[in-house]
Amino acid sequence: MATGAVAMICGSGVASAAAQSVTIKPTADTSYSQVPQDGDGSAKTTLVTCPASCEGNPNGEREAVVGFTVSGLPSGATNVTARLELYSWNAFTATTTTAYKASGGASGAGTWATRPTLGAALDSSTAVTQGYNAWDVSSAVTGNGAVTFAVRQSTRNSRVYWASADNAGTAIRPRLIVSYTAGGTASPTPKPTATATPKPTATATNPPGWRLVWSDEFNGTTLDKTKWNTRDSSVDYDRACITSRPQNNFVSNGMLTLRAIKEDRTCAGGTRHYSTGYVDTMGGKASFTYGRFETRAKSPNGPTNSKGLWPAFWMRPNDGGNGEIDVTELPGGSQYYKASTVAIFRDYTPTKNDFRYTFPSGYPGDGFHTYTTEWEPGVIRWYVDGREIWRREGNTPTWLKDTLGGDLNYNRKFNLRLNFQVGGWLGDPDASTVFPADFQVDYVRVWQR
Ligand SMILES: [Ca+2]
């Protein structure tokens, strides 16, 4: 989860000899990725457990590691018990899960090989149930202070996904429930839950502290080839042939339109049944290290017409090596059309961190919205319509500390890409998908400090 988080003590505590309980939120965990196969249609970030034999994984087993800071436990507390709870979207039989006390913190999930040292097993269960799964970890909670747990599953030869501390569903995040008898001393004081402060919607003027260094307002009648490349190409995860034709990429009425068309085209040695548009700034046209990157755009995706349509604005390093920053991905289909997904990749194993932000009202396809990423040394912030929705800073997970503003991945120049994928990992178009489909881009602007 985001850094700076502290354990939040929720629930009520009344000074009395009666048993009391507090629910503590995690300070950090080994958040991994978004996975559509976990059965949850809303935003989700996941913890992963996988045994040593998992899917031929050569790097050893993997535990879900979660840290907490117990605070507010009165000194006179007696009968202290603690229960670790993780949420699973699915039930699995013949699965044994065991909770351990783990050494150190919970950061570091980027690689399968990154594992803490585990102490003695605390509790086991013989199945994963849908919903919260609980382990008695009382022996590891003896008072206030930091404590880290690891959950391992050992007999299901595939990954189990658990909701993480980053999950958009706050009601399904990991939790530690500590119960005690107060003994007449002060009880924990409930704190309000922090909420993001809405920011004003960005305008054409420079945001404070930023100067405009590059932009395309798409005010002409043709695509400005001094700023953008088009391509005749294909990628294996896209069901469409990417073309440079004006049918698929055109500028009019102050907009760039990337249009996906249902038509047979030949590319990659075969026939595909769609064409689509794509533009980038590779080859020295525009690339940046750090900056504020924004597009104002309208997705074509509604609730019933958009399965398999996937426009996006993202960035990749000029040298083609590791690293990717996604300002927004806007996949269609009834499960996804309400959300903007943002992400940072170290590599495509995948070592990545991402977040699916569901619009509180409306959806990306209901009109034009702004999608912004501020990339600075040590922090990347993402915004939708000027409101910060997510940020990544230098220590969760561990690889971010190495990458943000630092080493080989993120101190290089990144170029800009607008694309409109058809089909792929989140499902292919079906009879309900409406073609042609237009991804309309009002502008792309880049500011720097
Ligand atoms: Ca415009």
Image (cartoon, helix red, strand yellow):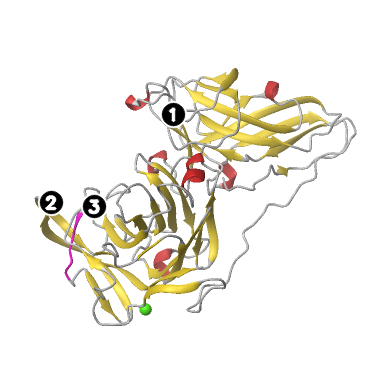
Q: Mark 3 and 2 residues: CB-CB less than 8 Å, in contact?
A: no
State the image coordinates of residue 50 (x, y, percent, origin top left). 43, 27
Query: Which label's residue is closer to the chain start, 3 or 1?
Result: 1
Disc 1 packing (10 Å; few <14; some 14–19; many ≥20): few
Q: Secondary structure at mark 1?
A: loop
Give the residues drawn in magenta, as a range: 240-245
Query: Which label's residue is closer to the chain start, 3 or 2?
Result: 3
Spatial CA span between label 3 and label 1:
31 Å
Spatial CA span between label 2 and label 1:
36 Å
| Residue at the image point whose x is 46% and y is 40% from the top | 32
Spatial CA span between label 3 and label 2:
11 Å
Q: Nearer the viewer, mark 2 or mark 1?
A: 1
Identify residue for label 2. Answer: 268
Residue 332 visible to an observer of this rendering: no
Q: Quadrant of residue 218?
A: bottom left
Q: Mark 2 and 1 residues: CB-CB less than 8 Å, in contact?
A: no
| Residue at the image point whose x is 22% and y is 51% from the top | 235
Q: Quadrant of residue 195?
A: bottom right
Picture disc at residue 149: none
Q: Quadrant of ligand 1?
A: bottom left
Identify residue for label 1. Answer: 113
Picture disc at residue 238: 3
